[in-house]
Amino acid sequence: MVLIPDTTSRITPSPTVNKTATTTANQTPKAANKTAKQSALSKGIWAEALVAHWLQAQGWEILHRRWHSPVGELDLVARSLTPSPTLAFVEVKARSSGNWDAGGLLAVTPRKQTKLWQTAHLFLAQSPDSANLPCSFDVAIVQCRRSHLPKIAHPPDPLHLQISKPVELGERVAIAGYDLTLEQYIWGAFDLPSL
């Protein structure tokens, strides 16, 4: 397991599943839902940082994190320069074990794929230097659980995450109170009309 110091396959459609937030005795359903969303956002940010680190170790340059448009968001936009320039739009799914959607894989529905394609199309329209590169839509599956280690008061900035060595697929990394494992990276996870 790698510790961060406290110094700072193809995708197929999934069935619709009703997910509900659980509440504690002291929380209203609305407060519990807000807490669950904040926790999911935090996990997602750290999972994206882990995947970005892994991609950089594979020789990819991270062009954008959490790129927003009116249509949607691209978790990561990365470019490989070797063997030939390629652009990857990476959807990162962070889930706890025993979840409803196969680690997030089933959450990348045809509707989500279309939304990613539309967002990528807008990205390329605003980035003419990347518009002629071959593109792929990749999916990263990150298992996430609360760490048994004490939570650090000032976790490192996820945009400037420094991990002392390359992270391997399946290797657990402790970051900001979470144990994260990059379980799968699916290159070219789905195909859509050419951009």
Image (cartoon, grey):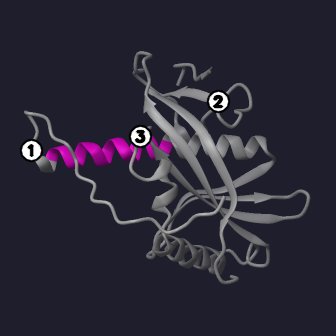
- The three-letter code of the residue at mark 2 reads Glu
Do the residues under discs 3 and 1 have CB atoms within 8 angstroms? no
State the CA–CA distance, disc 3 to disc 1.
25 Å
- Asked if the residues shown at circle 1 and circle 2 are in contact, with their CB atoms under 8 angstroms apart, the answer is no
Depth check, front residue: 172 or 154: 172
Q: Residue at x 52, y 77 (%)?
A: 114
SS for tag 3?
loop
Prevailing secondary structure of the magenta residues:
helix
Q: Quadrant of the N terminus?
A: top right
Callout 1 amino acid: Thr
| Residue neighbourhood size for the residue with mark 2, other residues' Cα within 10 Å, grouped as few (<14), some (14–19), many (≥20) | few
Counting from the top left corner in percent of width and height, residue 24 is at 13, 35
Of mark 1 and mark 2, the one earlier in the sequence is: 1
Q: Earlier in the sequence, mark 3 or mark 1?
A: 1
Q: Which residue is mark 3?
A: 98
Relative vertical location of residue 1 with respect to residue 23 in this rendering, above or below? above
Q: Which residue is mark 1?
A: 28
Residue at 74% over, 32% down: 166
Q: Quadrant of residue 3?
A: top right
Residue at 66% of width from left, 50% of height from top?
185
Residue denoted by label 2: 171
Helix, strand or loop for disc 1: loop
